[in-house]
Image (tube, rainbow, N blue to C red):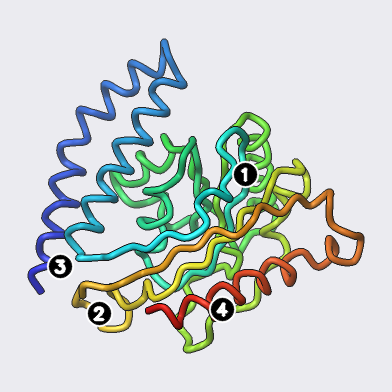
Amino acid sequence: MIRVLLALIFIIVFLIISLPVLGVEWIIHKYKPYAADISQLRIVQWAFRVLLFISGTKLTVIGEENVPKDEAVLYIGNHKSFFDIVITYARCPRLTGYVSKDSMAKVPVFSIWMKRLHCLFLNREDVKEALKTILVGIDNIKNGISMCIFPEGTRNKTQERMLPFKEGSFKMAEKTGCAIVPMAITNSAEILENHFPKIKATHVILEYGKPIYPNELDKETKRKIGVHCQAIILDMLKKNEKLI
């Protein structure tokens, strides 16, 4: 339980100390928006790397050269753990917002950081509100901000490798033509979820697949782009499970 206690202490201390930091960043943003965005990104990435260190997570990264560094992309991945966000966000090379469930917007301080980092809150129960959220994501990508979404729609708590991908998750890429970067996250549930509330030192593999440009796909593949992308991630998961 020592890792859990250390992680909780670090999160609480970070959120408290970050309150004046958020104030300073707000002032900077008034004059230099991009500089504020980048500094806030790096602060959170540092915090996430500390969390991974505290949790004893050994991370192996494969295919990081596949991530375009000079353009906004849509990251997609399988989702088994809360740590999936920590693992993947810590490695984003440029401004990136994550699509999260709308209940996260109610979490004090944490939600402020999410908004500052261009994260979006998706209401799964209201189609109109969900569409508005996706439209904001499309604008983000057009403005050079990458987005990340987990197309299963929720954390997969089953024994299956993945839940079916929701095709609507790919609208941000279809409407902008941006690259889709598949991410296969192997063994992340072993950090916490498989033996909650304990945090255990774990080997996790994160693999980035080659970027997929929707406009370069044939008509049939583009029509079932979720199935296509899920098959790519599934192949990576099967391969990497042998390396754990």
The alpha-carbon separation of the residues under discs 2 and 4 comes to: 20 Å
* Amino acid beneath label 1: Val
Q: Earlier in the sequence, mark 4 or mark 3?
A: 3
Q: Residues within 10 Å of mark 1 (few under 14, many from 20)?
A: many
Q: Nearer the viewer, residue 56 or 82?
A: 56
In percent of width and height, residue 163 lies at 59, 79
* Element carrying mark 1: strand
Q: Residues within 10 Å of mark 3 (few under 14, many from 20)?
A: some
Q: Earlier in the sequence, mark 3 or mark 1?
A: 3
The alpha-carbon separation of the residues under discs 3 and 2 comes to: 10 Å
**Quarter-of-image position of residue 167:** bottom right
Q: Is residue 179 above or below residue 182?
A: above
Q: Earlier in the sequence, mark 4 or mark 1?
A: 1
Identify the residue at image location x=55%, y=37%.
69
Q: Which residue is mark 4?
A: 162
Q: Which residue is mark 2?
A: 196
The alpha-carbon separation of the residues under discs 4 and 1 comes to: 22 Å
